[in-house]
Amino acid sequence: MREWVSGRVPPGEVAGAARIVVTVVVAWQVAVWLGADQPPVYAAVVPLVALRGDPVTALGASVQRSLGVVAGVLIGIAVVNLLRPSTAALAVVVALGLGVGMFLRASGGLNIQVAASSLLVFASTSPDAYAWHRVWETAAGAVVTVLLAPLLWPPDPYRTLAGIAEDCRVRVTRSLGGTAAVLGGEPGAAQDNLSLVTAHAEAVHGDAGRAREAERAMRFNPLRRRHREGVRVRARGIAAVDRAAGEVVVLAGEVAAFAGREELAGDLARARAPLAEVADLVVRVVEDVLGGADPAAGIAAARTAVAEYARTDSSPVAVALRRPLVRMLDSLGGR
């Protein structure tokens, strides 16, 4: 609500809207040049549906829409030729369209374009002519969208990944620091920390998905090729931190399980300082991995601290607390 009141529009949305406007105009004009005898609305609709955050999404949506339109108009023509337009025909068209859409996937979800295109056939007094016009106009719009999307104000995956990496760093740092801080404290605080760490890990996992999209975008982004290696390194680092983030949840779970147990008070008190020390070293490794630096030295220092911790405390509590940190180092080191 605050963003609506402020009236501020993110710069990326302005570029995205401009990309859509230009592509819509070009798709319309291309359809006219190809001989559209009526306003080629369906060629212009494709960019509106397909163009989103990056060229990869545009490509997938265009393919999905084009395949859905072809399948949909074929279903619509067949049903109209066999059944008169009626409630029964409508039910058949929608059922067939959704059924085909379950299998005709191009971007992971149900392709409702099949059913929508089938229904639109009913809107014309000449369904056959309408349907075939819709097929080639939509195909023309899809081709224009796929060709222009990577060239018009393409997103900058390198800058996008910098923001994603910083978000991952902050979340992992807070998760490890917060977990070390509540060790040996009240059960309520440990449970609250576990919930917060779990939320951070889920957010990091979402960041990793966005990083993969940004990396894929480079394949269709000829204007950003100089950043290809940097994008690959950053995306690989974010993926490693994503794998390691799950172990932070495990560590927070162990701390929550030990909280409030009087018989473990001594073990928990001894573990507080060495756990905080190892956690700080792991955070430095995370920073190296996300920054594209060689983490070998940091990992070696952290493993040395873990070995010293193991030498001075071999209690079951210490073993349980060290294990997630060791697995984090394995993940960050690419094991």
Image: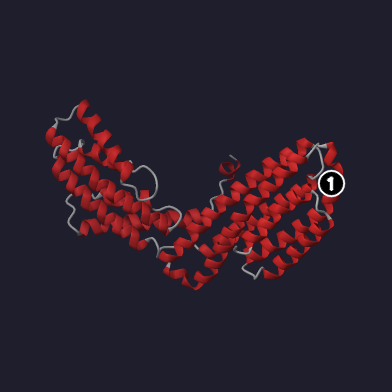
> Above or below — where is 169 with respect to 75?
below
Q: Residue at x 80, y 58 (%)?
A: 309
Q: Position of residue 278 (x, y in %)?
A: 76, 58
Instruction: Locate the C terminus by quadrant.
Output: bottom right
Tell me residue 34's x, y (percent). Answer: 19, 59
Q: Is residue 28 visible?
A: no
Does residue 315 show up?
yes
**What residue type is disc 1 on?**
Asp
Look at 84% across and 38% down and name the residue there. 263
Asked which secondary structure carries label 1, the reply is helix
Instruction: Give the residue displayed 63% in from the left and 52% down from the top.
Output: 245
Q: Which colour scheme is used?
A: secondary structure
Q: For mark 1, does the 10 Å Cα neighbourhood hold few (<14), some (14 to 19), or many (20 or more) residues?
A: some
Observer-nearest of 282 and 149:
282
| Left or right of 86 in this view: 160 | right
Q: Nearer the viewer, residue 126 or 193?
A: 193
Vertical position of residue 282 compared to residue 109: above or below: below
Residue where numbered disc 1 is placed: 267
Decide which of 197, 144 is in the foreground and name it. 197
Q: Where is residue 290 in the image (x, y as percent from the top left)?
A: 62, 63
Snapshot quadrant of residue 280: bottom right
